[in-house]
Image (spheres, grey):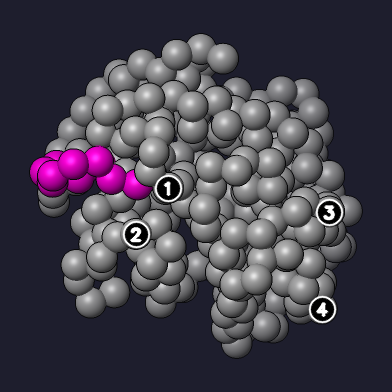
């Protein structure tokens, strides 16, 4: 895999934001502007149809950097953000829009689409991890966390199952159909978020996936309603969870 190249840098509210490219893969690394010594890394995965600079990614990154002192990185998933779609992407997206317009189930389209993207993205994230852990401000000795919602979970479950350097993970709100075998190989602490009344992702399927995680420490966070967004209260909980397992102290009232 290609080396990491930083292409731009800016500063806001105590957070340094650096654009980078890993070969042709674009991403962003957020870091504390000041602080002593090295700090752990948290990888994030964005949702389907979103991108590395989606407001949820920026907000979550600033929370993790400001309140926990983490470095936080995300890359555009294949066919998302600044990465071009291929012909299969276009067919899958057209099929999804057709199912939505007809009121038909989305899972028969979304599950194989997400699984196909994950096959590409998991090795990319592992190569990104190699490159980031070479940075002196992060270092190979520190623990790594992962947060993935929606498509980010579809990528994150097989990633965490395959990557021994990831020590804790937060997942939520994705169709679990293709994730059970990978979940059975995950033994690190997991925080898993579901919407209890979601009509698109059956509650029973999410509960079955929670059961499948082999982690001895895992927690299920369920919210009433159908809202597909990740609630702010869960962003705060994820920060506390990662701080606890990656050896940091939360410096605000999250």
**Whole-number angstrom distance, CA of label 3 to CA of label 4:** 17 Å
How far is disc 2 from disc 3 in space, using C-alphas? 29 Å
Q: Secondary structure at mark 1?
A: loop
Mark 4–mark 2 distance (CA, rounded to whole Å): 34 Å
Visible residue check, residue 82: no
According to the image, label 3 marks what residue?
A: 181
Q: Residues within 10 Å of mark 2 (few under 14, many from 20)?
A: few
Between the C-alphas of marks 1 and 3, the distance is: 24 Å
Quarter assignment of residue 10:
top left
Dot 3 lies on which element?
helix
Q: Which mark is residue 143?
A: 1
Magenta-colored span = 31-41
Quadrant hosting residue 183: bottom right
Dot label at residue 247: 2
| Horizontal relation, residue 121 to residue 50: left or right | right
Magenta run includes residue 92: no
Figure disc tally = 4
* Contact, mark 2 vs mark 1 (Cβ under 8 Å): yes
The residue sitting at 35% across, 47% down in the picture is: 40
Q: Earlier in the sequence, mark 1 or mark 4?
A: 1
Look at the image and tell me whether residue 159 can be seen: yes
Mark sitting earlier along the chain (1/3): 1
């Amino acid at each position: 895999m290609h080396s990491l190249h930083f292409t731009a840098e800016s500063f806001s509210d105590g957070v340094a934001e650096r654009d980078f490219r890993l070969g042709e893969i674009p991403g962003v690394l957020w870091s504390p502007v000041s602080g002593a010594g090295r700090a752990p890394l948290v990888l994030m995965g964005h949702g389907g149809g979103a991108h590395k600079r989606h407001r949820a990614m920026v907000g979550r990154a600033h929370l993790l950097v400001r309140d926990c002192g983490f470095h936080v990185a995300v890359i555009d998933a294949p066919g998302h953000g600044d990465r071009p779609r291929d012909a299969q992407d276009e067919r899958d997206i057209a099929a999804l829009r057709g199912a939505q317009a007809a009121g038909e189930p989305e899972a028969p389209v979304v599950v194989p689409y997400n699984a196909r993207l994950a096959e590409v993205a998991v090795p990319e994230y592992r190569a990104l991890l190699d490159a980031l852990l070479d940075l002196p401000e992060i270092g190979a000795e520190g623990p790594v966390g992962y947060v993935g919602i929606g498509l980010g979970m579809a990528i994150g479950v097989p990633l965490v199952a395959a990557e021994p350097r990831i020590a804790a993970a937060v997942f939520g709100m994705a169709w679990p159909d293709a994730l059970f075998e990978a979940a059975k190989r995950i033994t690190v602490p997991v925080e898993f978020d579901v919407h209890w009344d979601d009509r698109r992702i059956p509650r029973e399927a999410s509960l079955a996936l929670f059961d499948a995680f082999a982690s001895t420490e895992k927690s299920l966070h369920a919210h009433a309603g159908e809202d597909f967004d990740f609630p702010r209260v869960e962003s705060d909980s994820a920060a506390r969870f990662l701080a606890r397992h990656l050896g940091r102290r939360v410096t605000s009232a999250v």
